[in-house]
Amino acid sequence: MALTLWIFLALEVLGASSEVRQFFLQQASGQDCQTLQLGESWISHFLIDCHLECIRRYSENCQAVVYNSQTGNCRPGSVAFGPIEKVATSIPETGSSDKLYYVRQPIPPCNTSNSFALYDVCGTSACLYLSTSRAENYSDARTLCSQMDSRLFVGNTMAKFSLLWYTSKTYINDNLFTGLQDIAVEGNFVWENGEALSDEQNQYIWTPGNPDNSGGNQHCAIAFPEVSSKKTTLDDARCDLNRHYICERCSQC
Ligand SMILES: *[C@@H]1O[C@H](CO)[C@@H](O)[C@H](O)[C@H]1NC(C)=O
Ligand SMILES: *[C@@H]1O[C@H](CO)[C@@H](O)[C@H](O)[C@H]1NC(C)=O
């Protein structure tokens, strides 16, 4: 993941609440980061105008812009996230010369005891522990996180879901539990914070043909982030097998 070039620092803008918001607009190289277009594009002569106009029109919802410095074409974007193949409508399109500039999301506090650390992709950060050995099963993984004042990773937004892929591909490189399961009610997938899997995410997180509850005992969503596989989608699988896991610090868990 090559993130480059601080375009400008701490551009202070008066938001709707009259509080000064700070923007750190950072350019993503290649197709490392993507976003969803919030509305019609327009022409801006400079990147900074593109971003300011995006904030004027979309306020806090504008978290990224896709700008083409040759044509001045400016596209307003929602939060930036790392590459997820199944999101077909994302910008910039593969192969285009448009560049994505994203705003850093608020950085959560991170108690680094037990080898927790901040990980960041496309402007979204989380305080995580990446397992160095496998848990016995899902419930064991849950216990191991809980013993470190944390919970299994909750990838309940596109940005956080991409952080799961980024950290697991970059550091764990082996299959892992994802903090998403349908143990209680078959077909009702729930994140570790108790939140149901949203319809939006349900469209893009699964490998085609999954979840299929094959054999009637596949209740844990697992990722296979091996570097050789470009796949960024999940399968449902058995909960009682040894797998890696990612814990996330949380204030009430
Ligand atoms: C950080 O976490 C450890 C272990 O969970 C805890 O003992 C310690 O008090 C925490 N430190 C702070 C500053 O919260
Ligand atoms: C999961 O693993 C733990 C730790 O080895 C074990 O005590 C527990 O019985 C296992 N639970 C299930 C449901 O297999």
Image (cartoon, rainbow, N blue to C red):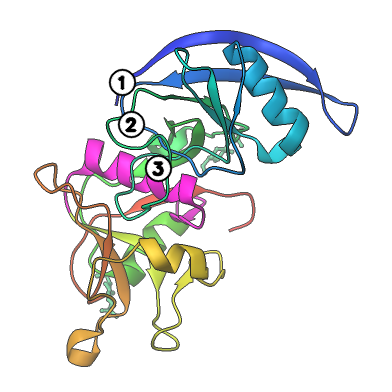
Estimate how packed mark 2 is, as few (under 14), some (14 to 19) or many (20 or more) residues with alpha carbons within 10 Å.
Answer: some
**Drawn side of residue 226 relative to residue 143, left or right:** left
N-terminal-most mark, 2 or 3 = 2
Quadrant, the C terminus:
bottom right
Of marks 3 and 1, the one in the foreground: 1
Residue 145 — which label?
A: none
- Marks 3 and 1, how far apart in space? 15 Å
Residue 163 — which label?
A: 3
Q: Residue at x 61, y 34 (%)?
A: 63
Of marks 2 and 1, the one in the foreground: 2
Label 1 sits on residue: 2
N-terminal-most mark, 2 or 1 = 1
In the image, is residue 149 above or below residue 203? above
Residue 186 position in % (x across, y down)? 39, 88
Q: Is residue 14 magenta?
A: no
Of marks 2 and 3, the one in the foreground: 2
Q: Residue at x 46, y 35 (%)?
A: 113
Q: Amino acid at mark 2?
A: Asp
Magenta residues span 147-174
- Marks 2 and 3, how far apart in space? 12 Å
Indicate which quadrant contains ligand 2.
bottom left
Q: Residue at x 54, y 42 (%)?
A: 37
Quadrant location of residue 189? bottom left
Name the residue nearer the viewer: 191 or 136: 191
Asked if labels 1 and 2 touch by Cβ distance under 8 angstroms, the answer is yes
Estimate how packed mark 1 is, as few (under 14), some (14 to 19) or many (20 or more) residues with alpha carbons within 10 Å.
Answer: few
Residue 74 position in % (x across, y down)? 56, 26
